[in-house]
Amino acid sequence: MKLFKFLLISCFIGFSQWTALAQEVNYVEENYVKQEFQIPMRDGVKLHTVVYSPKDASQKYPILMSRTPYNSGPYGKDTMKRSLGPSEKLMKEGYIFIYQDVRGRWMSEGSYDNMRPTLPDRKKNSKEIDESTDTFDTIEWLLKNLTNSNQKVGMWGISYPGFYSAAALPFAHPALKAVSPQAPIADFYFDDFHHNGAYFLSYWVATAVFGYQHDGPTDKPWYQMVNTGTKDAYQFFLDMGSLKNADKYYGEDNFFWTELKENPDYNEFWQKRNLLPHLKDTKPAVMTVGGWFDAEDLYGPLNIYKTIEKNTPNAYNTLVMGPWSHGDWARVSGAQKVSNIYFGDDINLWYQNEVEAVFFDHFLKGTGDGKTGLPEAYLFDTGTKEWKKFDTWPPREAVTTAYFPHASGALSTEKPAGNEFSEYISDPAKPVPHSPDIKFNFTPRKYMADDQRFAARRPDVLVFETDILTEDITVAGEIFAKLQVSTSETDADWIVKLVDVFPHDTPDHEYVQQGTHLSNYHMMVRSEVIRGRYRESFSAPKPFTPNQITEVPLQLQDVLHTFKKGHKIQIQIQSTWFPLIDRNPQKYVENIFKADDADFIKATHRVYHHSDKPTEISVQLLK
């Protein structure tokens, strides 16, 4: 239980608090005044809002706000945060920092709704609410009641607070000038709890946080985390069996668990919670931030940026993607590493001072004319380990190139010449692990850059790789897999992994975990899953016809990675990824959340290498 509480705090409550060790302990108390307000919304519900104002009253300050479901504490006028805002630099430059509990959470009134649907329009004098109206009403109140404000407002937030930042963009308040959604959720069916129809079982423990309504404002947790009684997540979930057996932990009491299991398809319930269709006519400047190794929210930042770029091409809309897992950029740490991969020193601090602070200062304190000096896209190449600037993303100069797996295990740009296939037996009783670690995470993290040798050496994982590269190859942009497959049964999951195979003589560095070596390291660069029943439509599932060749399209998230000379490019294909995702019974059932244990059966899966319909992986290359 202590582990889960710690992870909950570190993952969600305050990424900026990781900077506290680098700051004077009493800085906030010495330089800021704290106030707490219950701000009324248009429907009468009051939201708990904490205001930290600079003591120096000789000037007026912009407002920088974060809205959160994880608590705006510490509560009480005499207790203060140890650090404020996204970074130490911004805290010391002087802003009015606002933290607000969203409705239905902690000290705020009202009912909570996960990814509350955005209203399609705004009717005059309507009492209808969404996260945009709550933000609008909060800003309106702050501007009228804070006498030291310069009447300019910015927002930031990481993870779920990142969603609340992005959700403020539709029908934004005129004073909202700059918004930085960081690791934002865009659509719960493709972020966090699902990926292309596959349920992310690794988030099951987090269901407790989001699934219980509180009885009214409270400064104490009202939900109870599940005590699994073990550190071995793989065995725990295997012993649990079908997801229907999870009801004994949550059942009807947890409304979010009920919503998950009653809505397995991308139906109206999920569709109306998709924020992307509402990102139109964007007025505030936007800087979306994400991590290339963010196991939780990678879909969100990429697609929020692309959607705004498409719908409002003249908006100030930029993208920052670094060598980070979830929220790493908000911490101050010398060495930046994910799993066993070291990317360099002081990357986070550089971003905070030279990118994030520049963005907010320009639009909230400066001219706000958009001439920030920052590029359209500031992206980190995770192979060469350096920042690169782009005028567009994906780069317009990138060339789409197809790689073809061959039955021999080769991967090349040449199409197969024959009519061969590769096959494996997928057994739900012995699923492929997603990580070699024995642990029970609150949410997954390091697997995104883990060594994949443990999977490559299993018989139920297909491996295809190039010859040793004679020159650097930079993949920059989108990845699209077009699988030609069949199954002996009626359903299957398909997982595709893009892997960088290091040379045998790669030396270790000081951050390599004990028992691991970088010699022949199989670094996962990108991976994704699709539940095969959704190959034609996420809202209309369809069984497979046994042993019939079927096309399964799978969009992987973008990358910027240089496969260096002497390395190899590898593709892995498999059908289980446990307990990252739940197990597919492989026998088609209407709702996998309600499958019986007897429904889980072995199946033989094939990947085809036919000359007329080959399996292919398309990437965008920079020449």
Image: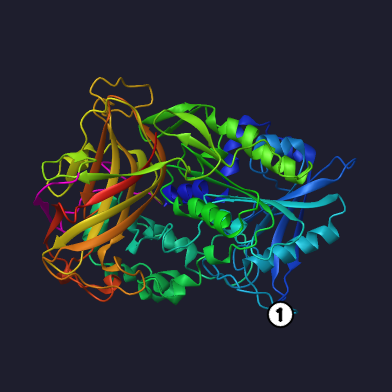
Q: Is the image coloured rainbow, by chain, by secondary structure, or in one colour?
A: rainbow
At label 1, counting other C-alpha atoms closer than 10 Å, the crowd grade (few under 14, some 14-19, many 20 or more) is: few
Can I make out residue 4 in this image?
Answer: yes
Q: Amino acid at mark 1?
A: Ser
Can I make out residue 578 in this image?
Answer: no
**Magenta stretch contains residue 434:** yes
In the rendered image, the quadrant that contains the C terminus is top left
From the top left corner, tell me how far across and down residue 600 is, in percent. Answer: 16, 66
Q: Is residue 471 above or below residue 255?
A: above
Of 360 and 28, nearer the camera is: 360
Q: Residue at x 79, y 59 (%)?
A: 142
- The quadrant in which residue 492 appears is bottom left
Label 1: which secondary element: loop
Q: Residue at x 24, y 39 (%)?
A: 570
Judged left or right of residue 2, residue 473 is left
From the top left corner, tell me how far across and down residue 521 is, in percent. Answer: 27, 31
**Magenta stretch contains residue 325:** no
Q: Residue at x 77, y 57 (%)?
A: 175
Judged left or right of residue 417, residue 139 is right
From the top left corner, tell me how far across and down residue 24 is, in percent. Answer: 68, 31
From the top left corner, tell me how far across and down residue 192 is, in percent. Answer: 42, 57
Q: In the rendered picture of this protein, how many numbered marks are placed on residues?
A: 1
Of 187 and 599, nearer the camera is: 187
Q: Is residue 605 above or below residue 355?
A: below
Q: Is residue 251 above or below residue 87?
A: below
The dominant secondary structure in magenta is loop
Q: Residue at x 40, y 44 (%)?
A: 445
Q: Mark 1 highlights which residue?
A: 126
- The quadrant in which residue 385 appears is top left
The span shown in magenta is 415-442
